[in-house]
Image: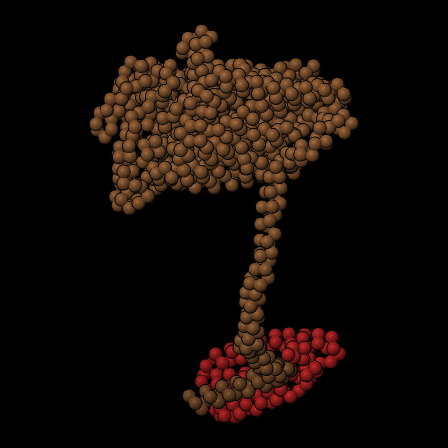
Amino acid sequence: MFALLAAETAEAATHSSLYDNVWLVPGLPALSFLLILFFGKKLPFKGAEIGLAAVGAAFLYALITMFTWIGDVQDSAAHGDEEEHSLVVEGLSVGSPVTGSPITESPITESPITESTASVVLTAEDSHGPPRGAAIVNEVEWFSIGSASGEAAHSDDGAEDHDEEAADDGHGASEYGKYPISIGTLVDGQSVMMLFVVTLVSLLVHLYSTEYVKGDRRYTHYFAFLSLFTASMLFMVLSSSTLQLIVGWELVGVCSFALIGHWWEEKPNSDAALKAFLTNRVGDIGLLIGMSILYFAAGRTFSIPRINELAVSGAIDKNTLMIAGTCLMAAVMSKSGQFILHTWLPDAMAGPTPVSALIHAATMVVAGVYMIGRLYPVFYIGFGMDGGSLNLMAFLGGLTTVGGGLLAFVQRDVKKVLAYSTVSQLGYMVLALGVGAYTAGMFHLFTHAFFKACLFLGAGSLSHACHHSFDMKSDMGGLRKVMPVTFATFVIGTLALAGIPPLAGFWSKDEILAGAGVWPGTEGNGTFTIPFIFGIMTAALTAAYMTRVIWLVFFGEYRGHEHPHESPKIMTIPLVILATLAVSVGFLNMPSPFVKAIGLPEGWAHRFEDWVEPASVSTFPSIKHANPSLSLAIFASFCALGAAGAVWMYYKRLYAKDPMATEYTAETGSIMANVAPLAMAHKVLEEKYYLDHLYTDAIAGGTKGPLARFANWTNQNILDGVVNLVGLLSAALGKFVYQFIDQGVIDGSVNATGKSASGLGGILRGVQSGQIRQYASLMFGAAALMAAVLIFAV
Amino acid sequence: MFLNQFLLFAAVLFCIGIYGVLARKNGVLVLMSIELILNSVNINLVAFGAYNQDLAGQVFALFIIAVAAAEVGVGLAIVLLIYRNRRSIDVAKANLLKG
């Protein structure tokens, strides 16, 4: 399909069957879903074993794929140092010096491509495999649309002139006016990374769930949907076309609906599931519109590499990209919980906790961020991130990250704090992508998956101990003594989330802040001042609200009425694994000055970037990489530590006054009660910025009142008028018919028949007198008559 | 041989029988009138048989006498039952089949 795909060399071909069969990764959980559904209840472990086996196998496959990919990328990079890639621009061979070494910060960039040279393809002239990070696509035709006549291609006025040229050489099929829709797998750094994250978190969640939902009334059903959820996300991750991506996207939404509403017998749970589903529908409209725009703009193709290639080369108009990107942002807002469509996300806590972990860490909410990464050129070029100072994506991400962080302060429910924290961190990822720091955003997605899954599963462990309560204020406190493993892992997760060095969150957060390009010496894609300020604020906020959680849950005195206990091993093992990862994965992407400073080999620096970010390919924009800054890292860490320390002191002083207290009251001297603006701010936060009120009362209520009145008026006056008129007319017609036709003609004829029969009968009955002699005389008379006839007439 | 006398006699006898059947109310008399009609037929058959030198007429007459005997047996039994039920053999009153 693509020349660059044809460039697979013998070396890469040895791995091609591995990449070609990567569909097994979503395929196995999908199969497991069906098996559990049909046979789960009859099995000894009620179907959990199928789910575990399938996801475990998928994880192994993903792991092998990941290591193969890393190997391929490093081979390719090694060759790139020695050789030159040649770039063919419409038949003219232009040698382009390749500076693909991982040491230098600048990525391998192609020579500037003007609009007239839209059909840039990298050919197989270099014999050392595809360029580093080029996507490997394996597709089969799903169905095709359009007529078979050749004219259709020319009547397609959606494609511009140069675009049509490009479309012709790339897609032979469009010459015949048929547009094949393909389904397939796209393997590149980003999807390989996600395969690993999704399968690993899902496997741990499966393991954890066997204990957590033990004895549940819909145990088998739960595991079936867990499998389908995993399969849907993996399907989306591997999608090679936008159409397939939409299908996966919606499947994920459906599964989250089913799992959030797992205990649907209680009204709030089914409400939460509905809210999640409906809020996502709002954004999905944006998704459909955005994808349709891209479909037509790219000359009728759903192919993701194709769209990206055309976006990078400038074949698609920049304004078109911006409009499509804005529409797609609506989808990101709903799916990835960005302001102002984030409201479903905290409510989704109604589902079982392992599901929350899966939703927040690996599957549902990162779908939006993943989609941005998948179509990154569309956003990068559409929003003009190169040299920009603010754009929709960076602003929304910044707003979300601070807004979510503030909301996390006023929650009593430990899961809700984590939910708002997820909102905040997703905002961080979107912010990163919005400022052009692609690797930083993806890296934060990667690290966040581990520590957030760890925190959520930790919260599940807490609730398991505290008899299914998540209320930090009334049912927890002082748990560090009774739950040492949960305590240790939760604290590690918290430190990672708060970005305390050297845990995972620190590295990714630092990279994002550097990517904003505001701090002196960082030099990112532009100077994104407002997102940078939001980012620094969130760094402090995150540390502060997580310190609050740690204090309320693990320190102070126990405030519940039950006897808490440590969770069983099968729940703590996933916690330990995730905590280990939360400590370690950050080292995958250390900046090179740091690596040099501590005396490690050069190859240890920014490995994640080398593996995940496509470089030197025509399907990815040439983004600039910010320089890491030691002073920025120290500053951000101090912000976080300072905020955490302040909160710690606040609770320490409170504890000294009243060991059982969870907040300052009038007696203990409440700062909230004394300062009016603070009290107001607190109220606003408790009401979640009144967004739920806005949606249910103002928007839903405001529309439904006048709408109902209008509908009523229409009903009463127009519809009822018509109905009444029709009714009157038919009544009149009926009356006429009754009087004249029915009564006169039909009944008349019937009656006449009856009457005549009865009249005749009346006459004839006289004959039947019962007198034998009369009969006899008639007989004789008749016989005599016959005789007379015989005698005289014959 | 004078055929006419026999035929006239049979005709008179037939008419008396008809009159008896139609006019009398007594069930037994109705049956007797029927016998008259049958016998007038017998006279005719025998008279034509003798006139034509043919025995078949007399054979038929014998059959009719046998049938008439059976018919009277049944008829009298009916009349007897009617009488037992109604204490009367007036055929005018036996009009249960009146429409």
Residue closest to the far top: A599
Vertical order, A471 against A63 (above or below): below
Chain that is red in the image: B
Please determine whether, in this image, residue A14 is positioned above or below residue A780: above
> Can the viewer see residue A158 in this picture?
yes
Q: How many marks?
A: 0
- The picture quadrant where one finds residue A790 is bottom left
- Which hue is chain A drawn in? brown
Nearer the observer, A223 or A605: A605
The reply to whether residue A581 is in sight is no
The answer to which image quadrant residue A309 occupies is top left
Which of the 4 image quadrants contains residue A607?
Answer: top left
Q: Which of the pair A730/A593 is nearer the observer?
A: A593
Q: Where in the figure is residue A389, as x and y percent of width and height?
A: 44, 31
Where is residue B35 shown, x and y percent of the image?
61, 82
Quarter of the image where the C terminus of chain A is located: bottom left
What residue appears at the point 52 percent right and 38 percent down from the top-left corner?
A280
- Does B24 sit left or right of A86 as displayed? right
* Residue nearer the viewer, B5 or A26: A26
Q: Which residue is at 55% across, 70% downward?
A: A729
